[in-house]
Amino acid sequence: MIDFDYIIIGGGCAGLSLAYEMDTKNKLKNKTLGIIETRDSYKRDKTWSFWKITDHNFEDCVMKSWNNFSVNSKIGHYEVKNNDYPYQTIDSGLFYKKVLKQIQQNKNIKFFKNTENLNLKSSIVFNSIPPKSNDESNLWQHFKGIEIKTEKNIFDDKIFNLMDFDCDQRKNVHFFYTLPFAKNKALVETTWLSRLNDNSLNDYDTQLENYIHNTLKIKNFIIEYKEQGAIPLFFPSTKKNNNIINIGSAGGMTRLSTGYTFLNIQSHSKYIVNQIENIKNTKIYNFGRKYKILDNIFLRVLKRYPEKMPSIFLRMFEAPSSTIIKFLSNKSNFLDDLRIILKMPKWLFIKNIF
């Protein structure tokens, strides 16, 4: 059996972010790290987006930034102007390239396909693989996106569409998301907030084709890139299990009401590295108990009244842009929270506190 000081299970965003932080902060000078990852090679397979409310290590991996965004449904349309916190999209291919270039120079870091020959009991293990859930009532944010290139300049690349609810809801919550990277290039994504076992919602290609043709009015385009995924919108176990510390979605770094994870992963990585010498006895990191409580109520409402969610989202975006962004990015103060709460249908949310 091979012994390592640290082992990271899963070489995705969370695992590589932690490895990068450990290496750049010189925590692996006299320590060893094993990374377990099944893939043979890395290529662009995700786009991670967020409002840049805090600094991060990957500015050189940003594909595009926007200050303004829109939200619309059958009953209304909002254009939100924001000069405080740009919305950024990270190219996972650039992220992988940057991290691997850094950590592959360190002879104390080794990659493995599985844990077969590794001594997990003697290491501090950082696990990024969420446990499988057999609860079919759990909600997921599942999606498929395609990056398209058009013959003509069609998109306004100064503003992105965060949520377009003016589409078939099928008794769930459904919206389209459009990120224009250039006037003739955009990522268009169909997104569902629903149970994952409903196969009637999985005709993603048809949904995208209809939306691009009928709503965006684009007839001729080529597909340059595709991505597909599912984000769990339920609370994982965050208890420390002897020498195992959960990270990423497995460690509760996904904001359940939004699916945003990237910046939470970066904050968690910094927290771990700052406490690495005493990590076994360190308090479990979380980005705010109040968000767990509020998200729990929000998800109960979503599960019980999906038909009301487009109007609820629209009402939320009536608040000042900085308030909305700070709330969605886990950086809101009491006044920000109050402004958001006052926009919500109060009796509906009060009924779902318990």
Image: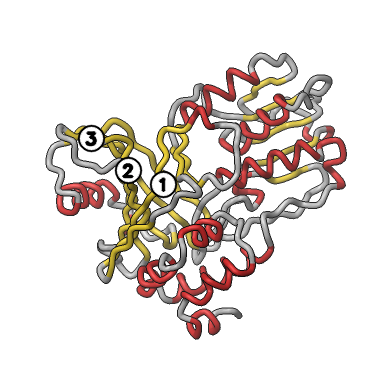
**Can residue 130 be seen in the rendering of this structure?**
no
Say if mark 2 contacts mark 1, CB within 8 Å.
Answer: yes
Q: CA distance from mark 1 to mark 3?
A: 19 Å
The dot on residue 184 is: 3
> In terms of sequence position, does the residue under pointer 2 or pointer 1 come before the other?
1
Residue 24, placed above or below residue 260: above
Q: Amino acid at mark 3?
A: Asn
Q: Is residue 25 visible?
A: yes
Mark 2 crowdedness (10 Å alpha carbons): few <14, some 14-19, many ≥20: some
Residue shown at 55% from the left, 57% from the top: 326
Question: Is residue 259 placed above or below 103 in the rendered structure?
Answer: below
Where residue 168 appears, as percent x and y from the top left, is: 25, 63
Contact between labelled residues 2 and 3, with CB atoms less than 8 Å apart: no
Q: Residue at x 63, y 48 (%)?
A: 250
Mark 1 lies on residue: 67
Crowding at mark 1 (Cα within 10 Å: few <14, some 14-19, many 20+): some
Q: Amino acid at mark 2?
A: Lys
Q: Is residue 155 above or below residue 292?
A: above
Tell me the distance, in whole angstroms, between the alpha carbons under discs 3 and 2: 13 Å
Q: Residue at x 71, y 39 (%)?
A: 270
Residue name at image x 49 percent, y 29 percent: 61
Quadrant assignment for the C terminus: bottom right
Residue beneath disc 2: 158
How far from the left and from the top, in percent, is residue 115? Answer: 69, 30
Query: Judging from the image, what secondary structure is the residue with disc 3 in?
Result: loop
